[in-house]
Amino acid sequence: MAPSKVLAGARVVLPTGTVDDGRVIVDGTRIADTAAPETEVIDVSGHWVVPGFVDIHNHGGGGASFAGGTHEDILKGVHTHRRHGTTTVVASAVTGDLDFLARHAGVLAELAQQGDIAGVHFEGPFISPCRKGAHDEQLLRDPDPAEVRKLIDAAHGHAKMMTLATELPGGLDSVRLLAEHGVIAAVGHTDATYEQTLQAIDAGATVATHLFNAMPPLGHRAPGPITALLEDERITVELINDGTHLHPAALRLAFHHAGAARVAFITDAMDAAGFGDGRYLLGPMEVEVADGVARLVEGGSIAGSTLTLDRAFKRAVTVDELPVEDVVAAISANPARLLGLADRVGSLEPGKDADLVVLDDAFDLVGVMRRGEWVVDPQVG
């Protein structure tokens, strides 16, 4: 059991707003509302304290892959992202052979059962060859509810989300199946029209996978999926705020039309996140990372990102000039709600897990706590 402590003097972002000269009381692994007299007081004056980050779309980091690695590989990636503030992470698979995906889902499910990850996201193979991005076209297939069910079952109750091109044959039935089993149906890697996207939303889709990327651009006569996903209040839109995937104006457009309550910042990170440039594999596809940008060796398509959520947070505040409270919603509260974990994580409230991030006045990360234990200790540096 972690010792009790009080973080005092910081600007603390709560669901009700920011409290200057605030404090967060940690009792063991949880946030508390009162502190014992002997509780350690940690002075974090001049800093921000925000909830731990929640990433619902992440393929790896630290040189390790969530998409096909061993337990040790996956944990290496998990710990890399924890050091950058992501205290809750969903492990994302990429398109592969269906039997391989089912077997690997079992590996990920074991780590979810242990509490190391928050569940499994299947990105592919049920996506459009027209918008495949960094997925192997030879392994793509139309959504088949029976095959969708196979992957859900393989995750042993830990399937959290599946990205589909819902316009493909079997797409709407697959969305309905996912919704029936409590798995998020996400519209992505899609060539759908505006009308087809509305059908998917009505069938139960609730997330837009990395909005703007791997889908038709917005047009004034053919508004496409982007418009449908932005205007429907049932949809939460994922955004990759790394300065490569989105122009700042596109990000501001999404915030303006969806509102802060319907945005989830994600990394879509691959192995190179928190590691460095070089050659990597994303599933079966070879990727070259140069100057922090990941692209397929063949074809040059963007292949995920090398983003960590602390960088996404700082960019959102300093470059995109978004209110800190809106960024906290997008990076913590909203994804926690999507995952059904809002009773435990996503905000700094008594009774919830003591997951938090300490940022300095320039919004650089200086501390990370997960379940009451320092992952990055602001007192040590």
Image (cartoon, helix red, strand yellow):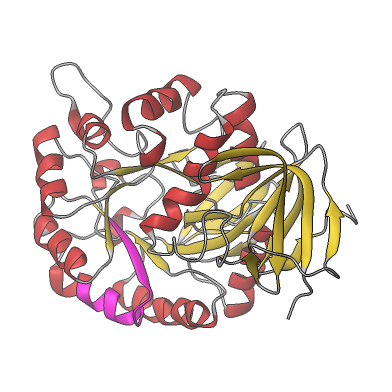
In this orientation, which residue lies closer to the viewer: 325 or 92?
325
Choose between 298 and 49: the one closer to the eye.
49
Q: Quadrant of residue 62?
A: bottom right
Does residue 123 appear to the left or right of 274 in the view shown? left
Pinpoint residue 152: horizontal percent, then vertical percent: 28, 75
Residue 269 colored in magenta in the image: no
Q: Residue furthest top?
A: 220
The image shows residue 379, relative to residue 22, as above or below, that is below
Q: Position of residue 239 (x, y in %)?
A: 44, 39
Q: Quadrant of the N terminus?
A: bottom right
Residue shown at 52% from the left, 79% from the top: 111
Front residue (pair 374, 287): 374
The x and y percentages for residue 370 are 67, 65
Residue found at x 9% / y 61%: 173
Q: Which residues are magenta?
A: 149-163
Horizontal relation, residue 288 to residue 260: left or right: right
Which residue is at a point 82% across and 47% down the rendered structure image? 44
Q: Is residue 227 above or below residue 178?
A: above
The tally of labels here is: 0
Residue appearing at x 23%, y 29% in the figure: 227
Q: Which quadrant would residue 224 be assigned to in this image?
A: top left
Question: Is residue 160 in the magenta section?
Answer: yes
